[in-house]
Amino acid sequence: MVDGKAGRGMPRSKEILNLAISIGEVMLESGGEIYRVQETVSRVLESYGIEDYHVFVITNGIFATVHEQREDAGSMVRYVPIGEVDLQRVAAVNQLSREISAGECTVEEAYGRLRQCKEGARPSKWVLILSGGIGCAGFGYLMGGRPYDSFFSFFLGMLLEVFLLVTAHYKASKFIVNILGSALVTAGSLALYAAGTGVLFDRVIIGGIMPLLPGVSMTMAIRDLFGGDYLSGSIRLIDALLTGMCIAIGVGAAIKVFQMLGGGVLPL
Amino acid sequence: MIAEIVMCMLATVAFAVLFHVPATEYFFCAVNGGVGWVTYSFWLSHGAGLTSASIWAALALTLAARILSAVRKMPSTVFLITGIFSLVPGAGLYYTSYFLIMGDLARFMEKGTETLKIAGAIVLGMIFGLVLPQSWFNHLGKAVERIRR
């Protein structure tokens, strides 16, 4: 992993390659586009005087070689599982690579800066839970809910965010998280409906499943396909489609169970 | 209308927090979300269908994100990812699933196709927005910087 000490005893070219790939890795796992990662790695290598290099990036891996024809040849492969979107890191690492290419940063300094980028402040759990609630309430309102329905979306959104944080902690499978998450929202909304609160349960559900929707995968798929990275774009596209299907399964299953429990036919 | 825009901006900021956007960019993410929603509801109220309204909204959103990215010196992803959520067809996905469970296959097909069409429309709109060369946006960013000094 990224560590300034890892550079000791390595040829200089390898040290630079390690830095460049580590910067690319942080960017890729936090939600950077393929072309941006590729460009960043190349830019860092060039800024430190490496001319003969090859970089290949896909959604979950980086491959690169430097100075293939020379004594100090180096090559590296990094497996980068799709991680949690963290746009602050993408922005910070992007800034770092700009400074490197402006020649304002030595290799050793860059390692230090990269470590800072990785440890940068994150919003606390409470802030995340609260914004999950606000997001669901807001989108529930946009999708035709009344303020009264948004009020309930708010609490379901917070509940969903707690669920997402817990499952992220146990590294649960994405499929299970999406199915159970959307089932949780649907069940909560139907329970409110059955309790006689008079909510428009469909609007509450639509607002509630918002954080699960594959907006990120879809955006990334388009950007990657547009950049000519067809393989990476397809990976993202499949991810988006499967996520959508999982949400549909979760919602459908919860409605079915509700009906079997005697909830009757739901009005539209 | 005003209430909708405010709610859209608020919800966009909430999602920006979820995606760990730097706090200095919250306001601009909100503006981008607002641009998308205003365009979307403008075309809807002028008789456009869901699909064509989504194309226009995605186009406006992408252009706004690229302008903001040049002015704010941030990757455009920051604004694009947070802004796109007001357009993602969550309602369509819900009704598709609902009609499937209810056994109403005709309406299931109708809603399912509509959802896919909206998703395709967002793709198209974004692609149109990405076609413009980056150098134009870079010039714009530099011009704004000159004015600020």
Image: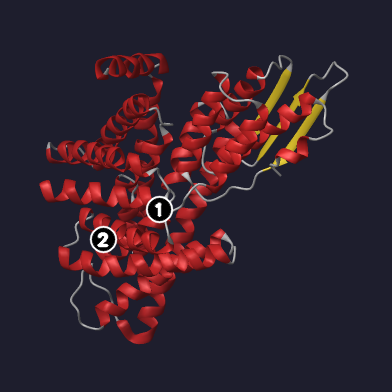
State the mark number for residue A67.
none
The mark lying in front, picked from 1 and 2, is: 1
At label 1, counting other C-alpha atoms closer than 10 Å, the crowd grade (few under 14, some 14-19, many 20 or more) is many
Q: Secondary structure at mark 1?
A: helix
Q: Secondary structure at mark 2?
A: helix
Q: Whole-percent x and y of residue B98?
A: 35, 64
Q: Whole-percent x and y of residue B94?
A: 34, 60
Does residue B35 appear to the left or right of A75 in the view shown? Answer: left
- Residue situated in front as seen by the camera: A180 or B45: A180
Residue at x 40%, y 14% (from the top left corner): B135
Does residue A20 appear to the left or right of A153 in the view shown? Answer: right
What's the residue type where badge 1 is placed? Leu
Residue at x 85%, y 16% (from the top left corner): A70
Q: Whole-percent x and y of residue A225?
A: 52, 31
State the mark number for residue A137.
2
Residue at x 24%, y 51% (from the top left corner): B10
Chain of residue at mark 2: A
Residue for badge 1: B18
Residue at x 52%, y 24% (from the top left corner): A98
In this view, A197 is above or below A102: below
Chain of residue at mark 1: B
**Viewer can see residue A50:** yes
